[in-house]
Image: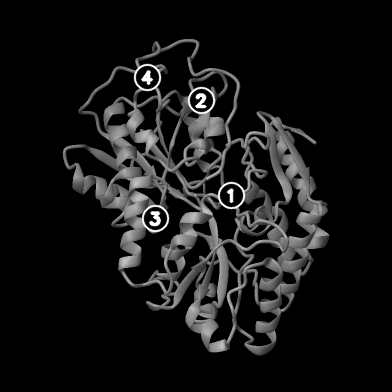
């Protein structure tokens, strides 16, 4: 996605089997969707092949979204479906785009539906590739009912919107909040911090008084979205269709890096991914608090294969603020569903993505994250709170969706991939984040230019 400043998930390497996250933003791009030859534009505003309502559809999902496919099969046994699992473009692997480019060159092979963990795919999927028809089908010109689109949480579909047209449906919202273990906080006599300064001070206290306990991690590729986006760091300020301002030397970037350097050094914010056996082994029962996305609730804390935090312990607080400022938050994924413009059964493909994003059978009963579809979100919160699992209500999660800072965008390039390649090894090598900021800036600039951006 391309967010205009002025306008306001355990993932593995790519594995193919089978047959084959409240902000005002906008996506912009050049070029249309009509190919120079081939099918004529259909009633939905893009070229379509001859339709067959009985044709089987192929759906690509990551491992976590296989449950969405299972729920759809149960609800719609009349629809023939082949499910293919892949990495979901996790951590900026770009596998979604790479595979579609291969199919473009071959002229066949496209799946009917694709799930991506990334929010920047509409920036390329809505455009022609080497003169070929755009992969993503336009959803807002009649393929998906306007009444359905209108019921998504305001701003949720903006990452999917290019020049006023919607090209994907958002799975869940991924606003960052402060997760904490209320039982441990009460036992240690600590208060929930409300500012990043208080958070750092508490981390320093924990290192001295309760070594081995942690207050966060920096081992995942979405670390910049949690800490630097939440600090208004101008590392990713997309200001136009192909322009970006990158300045990691600002005070906002420096303060986040300095805070993390302190907490990394004292051991309370380790360079370990939350989706590793090492993390579970070392930190089960030791996570005092953790800034992170809404989906951490089901993916990490209330997960029998991860931390397994007992009922009645997990609390959630609003995003932290820098002292004297209004709290803002980053957005960590959320996931998007695309329908292929090449599909021979658009009716079934649309039915699947609509089910996966709006149906209670998946979004309320199964999905771990806060749904982007507002009616499902309300029911999800009610169900979660009725479970008595949480030590607090979940209103902080709901309200955080309106606090996402608009000065951080997602261009075609992936900040997660850049961070994983540049910053994670540096941290592992003992370098400070403050010292790595210029290297980060250069890496962002270089990648943006490779993708055709003018960098300021």
Residue 371 x/y as whole percent: 40, 50
Neighbor class of circle 2 (other Cα within 10 Å; few <14, some 14-19, many 20+) is few
| Location of mark 1 (residue) | 404
Mark 1 is surrounded, within 10 Å at the Cα level, by few (under 14), some (14 to 19) or many (20 or more) other residues, namely many
Between residues 268 and 398, which one lies in front from this camera angle? Answer: 398
Residue 35: give x, y in percent of width and height: 48, 14
Tell me the CA gap for discs 4 and 1. 32 Å
SS category of the residue bearing label 1: loop
* Residue that mark 3 sits on: 64
Residue tagged 4: 44
In the figure, is residue 165 to the left or right of 348?
right
- Residue at the (58%, 61%) spot, across then down: 319
Q: Which labelled disc corresponds to residue 446?
A: none
Whichever of callouts 4 and 1 sits on the residue coming sooner in the sequence is 4
Q: Residue 308 vs residue 402: left or right?
A: left
Earlier in the chain: of badge 3 and badge 2, it is: 3
Q: Is residue 420 visible?
A: no
Residue with the mark numbered 2? 164
Query: Is tag 4's residue or tag 3's residue first in the polypeptide sequence?
Result: 4
- Viewer-side label of 3, 1: 1
Distance Cα–Cα, label 3 vs label 2: 30 Å
The CA span between labels 4 and 3 is 31 Å
Residue drawn at 73 percent across, 65 percent down: 427
Question: Between marks 2 and 4, how big is the CA–CA gap?
Answer: 14 Å
Between marks 3 and 2 in the image, the one whose residue lies nearer the viewer: 2
How far separated are the C-alphas under marks 1 and 2?
21 Å
């Amino acid at each position: 996605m391309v967010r205009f400043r002025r306008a306001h998930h355990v993932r593995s390497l790519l594995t193919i089997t089978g047959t084959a996250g409240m902000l005002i933003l906008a996506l912009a791009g050049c070029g249309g969707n009509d190919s120079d030859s081939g099918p004529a534009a259909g009633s939905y505003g893009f070229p379509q092949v001859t339709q067959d309502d009985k044709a089987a559809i192929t759906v690509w999902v990551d491992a976590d979204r296989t449950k969405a496919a299972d729920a759809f099969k149960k609800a719609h046994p009349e629809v023939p479906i082949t499910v293919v699992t892949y990495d979901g473009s996790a951590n900026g692997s770009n596998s979604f785009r790479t595979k579609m480019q291969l199919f473009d060159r071959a002229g066949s092979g496209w799946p009917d539906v694709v799930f991506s963990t990334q929010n920047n795919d509409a920036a390329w999927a809505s455009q022609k590739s080497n003169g070929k028809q755009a992969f993503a089908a336009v959803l807002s010109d009649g393929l998906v009912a306007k009444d359905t689109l209108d019921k998504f949480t305001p701003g949720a579909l903006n990452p999917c919107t290019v020049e006023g047209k919607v090209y994907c449906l958002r799975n869940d919202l991924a606003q960052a909040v402060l997760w904490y273990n209320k039982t441990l906080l009460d036992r240690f006599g600590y208060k929930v911090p409300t500012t990043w300064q208080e958070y750092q001070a508490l981390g320093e206290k924990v290192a001295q008084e309760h070594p081995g306990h942690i207050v966060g991690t920096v081992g995942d590729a979405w670390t910049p979205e949690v800490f630097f986006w939440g600090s208004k760091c101008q590392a990713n300020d997309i200001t136009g269709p192909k322009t970006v301002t990158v300045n990691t030397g600002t005070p906002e970037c420096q303060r986040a890096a300095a805070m993390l350097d302190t907490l990394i050094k004292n051991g309370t914010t380790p360079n370990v991914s939350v989706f590793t056996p090492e993390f579970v082994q070392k930190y089960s029962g030791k996570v005092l608090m953790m800034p992170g996305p809404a989906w951490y609730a089901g993916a990490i804390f209330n997960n029998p294969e991860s931390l397994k935090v007992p009922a009645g312990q997990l609390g959630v607080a609003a995003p932290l603020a820098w002292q004297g400022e209004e709290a803002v938050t980053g957005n960590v994924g959320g996931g998007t569903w695309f329908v292929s413009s090449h599909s021979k059964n658009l009716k079934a493909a649309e039915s699947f993505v609509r089910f996966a994003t709006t149906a209670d059978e998946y979004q309320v009963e199964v999905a771990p994250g806060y749904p982007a579809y507002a009616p499902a979100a309300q029911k999800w919160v009610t169900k979660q709170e009725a479970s008595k699992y949480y030590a607090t209500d979940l209103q902080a999660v709901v309200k955080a969706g309106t606090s996402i800072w608009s000065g951080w965008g997602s261009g075609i390039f992936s900040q997660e991939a850049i961070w994983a390649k540049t910053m994670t090894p540096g941290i592992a090598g003992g370098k400070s984040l403050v010292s790595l900021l210029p290297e980060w800036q250069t890496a962002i600039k270089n990648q943006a230019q490779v993708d055709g951006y003018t960098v300021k």
